[in-house]
Amino acid sequence: MLSTIRRQIASSVFGLAPLLKDILNRHLSQLELSELDDNSDIETVSQLFAEFRSEVDTLIQRAQRVANGPDPKLQAFLKVIRDKQQLENNKLLVFSCFRHTWEYLAENLNREQIRVGLIHGKIADEERRELRNRFSLPKENANALDVLLSSEVGCEGLDYQFCDGMVNYDLPWNPMRVEQRIGRIDRYGQKSPTVVIYNFITPGTVDAEIYDRCLLRIGVFQQALGASEEILGTLTQEIQNIADNFNLSEEEQAARLQQLSDNEIRIMQEQALLEQEQSKLFGLTQPQHDQDLIRQASSFWLSKTMLANLIIRYLQTLGVTNLPASLGQKSVATLQLGQDIREKLLKQCQNLKISGEAVQNWQRWLKGNDPYLPLTFNQDTAADRRDLMFITPTIRWPSKPACRWNRIRPCYAI
């Protein structure tokens, strides 16, 4: 819980007093817990806080006095927004882990008359889709949103390839969560040659040490991390252990993080180098030939009709006979697969040992009771209908997930 408080300060000190009041009064919401992925026993923590209530009250008063002063982080954020508004594509997707930070930012952006929306884990799916669609509208449209604030899980299941700018107002310590954030805009269908990532880091915090010594060195902002998930899981746990060890001095903490970087990250870099050599062996050089590969993915043999034929032939080998003739020809088609076929597909998918949001959604449908699967091969239809499964060619490097071909260096905003 102390780690959560410290991370809230790094995110926005203006959210500290409300957070402490919530904890002190045992009102820390399940929403906040789900966003933070925190397994703490809130009742026990709240009881401990109550035992030294006067000290917490004093800290709340100090936090409130600080909150009455200027906020340089907010001013830097507003400058990024104003600069972005001058461009043809003025959209900015903004992430934060903390409820009180979202609310603080939304209040200030509304005061600045910036068209802003907010989605988080408790927003209904239909409302999320409506906000996403408003965010996709051109800025000339009176109903358009210019900035979309999102919690950690708010964007799950939604893609924003029409947006080429993202702000991490605060950063999770888990590199895979950072990767998932970037993947919301840096994905198939992104029309901009580059995406811009602004990382807001508060100097003098453990977040800054983790950013400098781990996240930058991993290369999470420049390239897809891919098959390093097992290593990243270990790395994330080690980062958490070091950051949560309050017995370490700042110097000892920095030294431990540096040692972690020198060990685990070196292994990741060696694995990435090996995969690059494997790519060269198969004639897949990166990044020089990325654009050629993308053009090849649009060639005749990977057209939507040919993809549909490939799926039909594959399902026929499993015994499916009632396949729709419109598959790949109409904008929307519906597959009907019996439970026995879905079980076969589920087993084959699990044997592949691959992961990702799309795989999870696919497995979730295979495990369910609904035999009908609406899908599309059309990008425009998929953008309008977020409930459809979008079938598209995906470039894959050996042992890596879908290739993202454009990353640029992150920017220090603070």
Image (tube, helix red, strand yellow):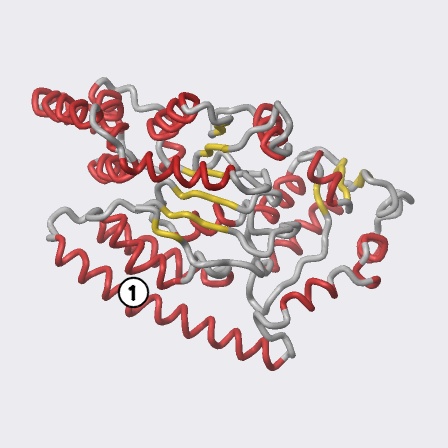
Report x, y in % for residue 119.
49, 29
Residue at the spot x=24%, y=36% of the render? 9
Q: Which residue is at a point 47% across and 75% down the rendered structure image?
A: 273
Q: 187 or 40, which lies in front?
A: 187
Residue 32 x, y percent position in the rendering: 36, 29
Identify residue for label 1.
Answer: 261
| Secondary structure of residue under mark 1 | helix
Crowd class of label 1 (few under 14; some 14 to 19; many from 20; radius 10 Å): many
Name the quadrant of the N terminus: top left
Q: Is residue 276 depicted above or below 235 in this figure?
A: below
Q: Quadrant of residue 133?
A: top right
Residue furthest front in the image: 86
Quarter assignment of residue 68 = top left
Whether residue 318 can be seen here: no
The outermost residue toward the bottom is 281
Q: Is residue 156 visible?
A: yes
Residue type, numbered disc 1: Ser
* Residue located 70% across and 51% down the image: 345
Q: Is residue 235 left or right of residue 20?
A: right
- Compared with 46, 344 (above or below) is below
